[in-house]
Image (tube, coloured by chain):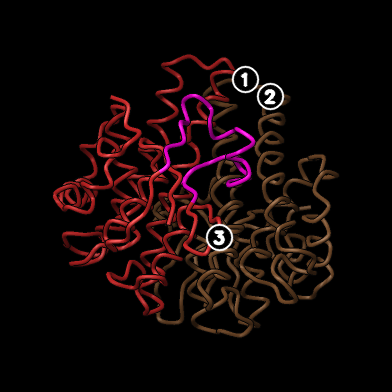
Chain colours: A brown, B red
């Protein structure tokens, strides 16, 4: 398999975690989001929306959207299973994953922040306030959902799921942007537990071939 | 089952389409997003992020996030199946659903538009340009993905899937906001085909008990 990824892209990071948890090998291709490589004609052929990650399967199929890719990988290599089989347990994992993937991440995406600055003339302080606002709203809700699950090392019990694949990159981004994360002790405990695991470490931005310090 | 919904919310609309396609009965509870009812303590108990839709299952479980809810409904009542079983076919449906649910919808959500106006002082023309920009980027990519599927009445063949549950509310919103949709003939053909079907009609905003003309 081939993965088109950017070291700092949190959606790419989700897929790298899933691949590492499952022990699946792949070739890494860096797409530099800072230089605009994602908008090249060559990359638009892989991803019409001009994004990462893109997975190229062993059969040559191009697949975009991190949650679609992880669902596919879960069928390809079901161990460890990232989406439970039981309908309600599965829905709970998807609920957390989508809270992050729909209600937090897209609003703070690079292209959205770029539009705020370039088209709307938003200054750096306003951009940071925007970023922190959506992180705070989303993580507060995530904290409540996790509290309802009781106390576990991962979001849902003793094994990682799709929810953890989404949580870690989101919190890593929030940390990097200097968000105050002291109000989310459950989220942070899970984050720290995940970061201590080898698969999560192997997927980290600083470990990727296209890492820029 | 109980559904907390707002007639004009496109994420609620997705779930209403799924429920109608599957012929599942439910009690409808309107949550008025215009008056801020979603931010009440009572509703935050149902949805920590303060959103709709919320499904209350027959067992009393509260479930948020439209795609998680539809995945759950697909297990509860597998006919008609909205997510294929075959891994790649399933990934293709999820790819389209997430393009809409992650790359278009969240950026144009009511709370985001509200922040632009209230916190950043964006005027009506700038807000409309913002809305149209993300719709145009997303639908152009959607058109390419659908072209690759060949010609079908629905996004994926002769039967509706989760992709159609997402496409119809997104296009309906874009129409309502006066977006130019002439560049997306595949998207629009599927949209019109869906609107001619009874289940999609029953789920439409104008047919809901909380509809405001």
- Whether residues under marks 3 and 1 lie with C-beta atoms below 8 angstroms apart, the answer is no
Q: Chain of mark 1?
A: B
Of marks 3 and 1, the one in the foreground: 3
- Dot 3, how many residues are within 10 Å of its Cα: few (below 14), some (14-19), or many (20+)? few
Please tell me whether residue B35 belongs to the stretch shown in magenta. yes
Q: Earlier in the sequence, mark 3 or mark 1?
A: 3
From the image, tell me which residue sits under label 3. B61
Q: Is residue A170 above or below residue A46?
A: above
* Chain where mark 3 sits: B
- The residue that mark 1 highlights is B119
Labels 2, 3: front one: 3
- The range drawn in magenta is B29-54
Q: Are marks 2 and 1 on the same chain?
A: no
Q: Nearer the viewer, residue A146 or A17?
A: A146
Secondary structure of the residue carrying numbered label 3 = loop
Name the quadrant containing residue B91.
bottom left
Side of A122 where A157 appears, left or right:
right
Q: CA distance from mark 3 to mark 1?
A: 36 Å
Q: How many marks?
A: 3
Above or below A20: residue B38? above
Q: Position of residue B29 (x, y in %)?
A: 42, 42
Horizontal relation, residue A73 to residue B3: left or right: right
């Amino acid at each position: 398999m081939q993965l088109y990824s950017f070291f700092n892209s949190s959606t790419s990071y989700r897929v790298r975690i899933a691949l590492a948890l499952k022990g699946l090998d792949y070739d890494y291709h860096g797409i530099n989001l800072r230089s605009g490589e994602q908008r090249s004609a060559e990359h638009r052929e892989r991803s019409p929306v001009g994004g990462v990650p893109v997975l190229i399967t062993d059969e040559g199929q191009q697949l975009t959207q991190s949650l679609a890719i992880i669902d596919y990988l879960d069928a390809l290599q079901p161990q460890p299973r990232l989406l439970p089989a039981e309908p309600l347990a599965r829905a709970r994992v998807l609920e957390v994953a989508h809270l992050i993937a729909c209600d937090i991440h897209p609003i703070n995406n690079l292209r959205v922040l770029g539009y705020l600055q370039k088209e709307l003339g938003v200054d750096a302080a306003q951009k940071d306030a925007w970023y922190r606002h959506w992180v705070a709203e989303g993580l507060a809700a995530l904290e409540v959902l996790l509290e309802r699950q009781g106390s576990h090392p991962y979001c849902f019990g003793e094994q990682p799921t799709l929810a953890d694949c989404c949580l870690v990159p989101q919190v890593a981004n929030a940390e990097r942007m200097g968000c105050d994360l002291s109000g989310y002790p459950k989220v942070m405990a899970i984050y720290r537990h995940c970061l201590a695991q080898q698969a999560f470490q192997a997927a980290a931005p600083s470990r990727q071939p296209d890492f820029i310090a």
